[in-house]
Image: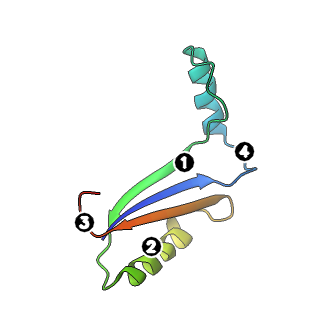
C-alpha cells in the first residue's frame, strides 16, 4: 500500500518557520499571503496483509517517530496502487 502522511503543528503552537516563509514572501511582493504554517509531507510503501493492518502500523509509526504528538497533528491517506 502507498501511504501519504501529512504532519502539521497544532493550532496555537508557534511556527517560526512559517513566519520566516511569510516574511520572505512579503519581501518578494506577495503581500496577500497570511498565516503561513509549515509542515512535513512523507510518502512511503507499507507491506501489510490488510488495509486495517496498514492503518494501525502507520498510526504506530506516526505516534512513535514521525510526529511529535505533543505539538503536531497528523493525518494519512492509503491507496492500493502505486500511481495515486
Q: Which residue is disc 4 drawn over?
A: 14
Residue 47: x and y in percent read 29, 77
Q: Residue at x 57, y 19 (%)?
A: 30
- Name the outermost residue toward the left: 82
Question: Helix, strand, or loop for circle 1?
Answer: strand
* Mark 1 or 3, closer to the camera: 3
Q: Give the number of the disc on residue 2.
A: none
Q: Which residue is disc 1 drawn over?
A: 39
Cα separation between marks 3 and 2: 17 Å
Residue 15: x and y in percent read 67, 42
Among the 4 quarters of the image, the one containing residue 36:
top right
Q: Residue at x 68, y 58 (%)?
A: 71
Q: Which residue is disc 3 drawn over?
A: 81
Quadrant where the C terminus is found in the figure: bottom left
Question: Helix, strand, or loop for circle 4?
Answer: loop
Q: Mark 3 vs mark 4: which is more N-terminal?
A: 4
Among the 4 quarters of the image, the one containing residue 67:
bottom right
Cα separation between marks 1 and 4: 12 Å
Q: Residue at x 49, y 56 (%)?
A: 6
Quadrant where the N terminus is found in the figure: bottom left
Q: Give the number of the disc on residue 58.
A: 2
Among the 4 quarters of the image, the one containing residue 81:
bottom left
Amino acid at each position: 500500500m502507498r501511504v501519504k502522511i501529512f504532519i502539521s503543528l497544532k493550532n496555537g503552537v508557534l511556527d517560526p518557520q512559517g513566519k520566516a516563509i511569510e516574511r520572505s514572501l512579503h519581501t518578494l511582493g506577495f503581500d496577500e499571503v497570511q498565516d503561513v504554517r509549515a509542515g512535513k509531507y512523507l510518502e512511503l510503501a507499507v507491506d501489510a496483509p490488510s488495509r486495517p493492518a496498514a492503518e494501525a502500523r502507520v498510526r504506530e509509526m506516526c505516534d512513535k517517530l514521525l510526529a511529535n504528538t505533543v505539538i503536531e497533528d497528523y493525518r494519512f491517506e492509503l491507496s492500493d496502487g502505486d500511481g495515486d
